[in-house]
Amino acid sequence: MLRLVLQEILLFSLPFLTFAGWLLFARRSPLDHAEWKPQWTRLVLAGLFIVVASLVMTGLTAERTADGYVPPRYENGRLVPGHFQ
């Protein structure tokens, strides 16, 4: 689960890292607040778009299995606990 969260954080930060790289390439300071201020909205929206697109693609292309969680149930008067198959 931690890997998935870190992966989404990395995907969200891609536009910010790309912009910082562009600032370095253009010989501007990536630490200057004036360079970042006009771009915050675009960078956040681009990051959100990348994260949502990755989640949609994962949902569409993920491997489906018939196995999964079997909820608890009564069988012959006894409670059979839930389990994973």
Image (spheres, rainbow, N blue to C red):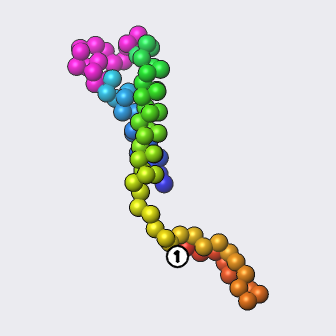
Q: Residue at x 31, y 27 (%)?
A: 18
Q: Position of residue 4 (x, y in %)?
A: 44, 50
Looking at the image, residue 57 sits to the left or right of residue 69; the answer is left
Going by the picture, which residue comes out furthest to the right?
77
Magenta stretch holds residue 13? no
Choose top left, top right, bottom left or bottom right for residue 30. top left
Is residue 3 shown to the viewer in this render?
A: no
Choose top left, top right, bottom left or bottom right for residue 56. top left
Magenta stretch holds residue 28? yes
Looking at the image, residue 32 sits to the left or right of residue 22; the answer is right
Q: Residue at x 44, y 14 (%)?
A: 37
Q: Residue at x 22, y 19 (%)?
A: 25
Badge 1 is on which residue? Answer: 85
Q: Which residues are magenta?
A: 20-35
Q: Position of residue 69 (x, y in %)?
A: 57, 70
Choose top left, top right, bottom left or bottom right for residue 84. bottom right
Where 80 sits versus 65, above or below? below
Q: Residue at x 50, y 72 (%)?
A: 67
Going by the picture, which residue comes out furthest to the front?
60
Going by the picture, which residue comes out furthest to the top?
34
Dot 1 falls on a residue whose secondary structure is loop
Q: Position of residue 68 (x, y in %)?
A: 53, 69
Where 11 sits versus 24, above or below? below
The amino acid on which the numbered mark 1 sits, given as a three-letter code, is Gln
Tell me the crowding category of disc 1: few under 14, some 14 to 19, or many 20 or more residues within 10 angstroms, Cα based. few
Name the residue nearer the viewer: 84 or 65: 65
Q: Position of residue 64 (x, y in %)?
A: 44, 63
Where 34 sits versus 13, above or below? above
Name the residue nearer the viewer: 61 or 79: 61
Where 62 sits versus 39, above or below? below
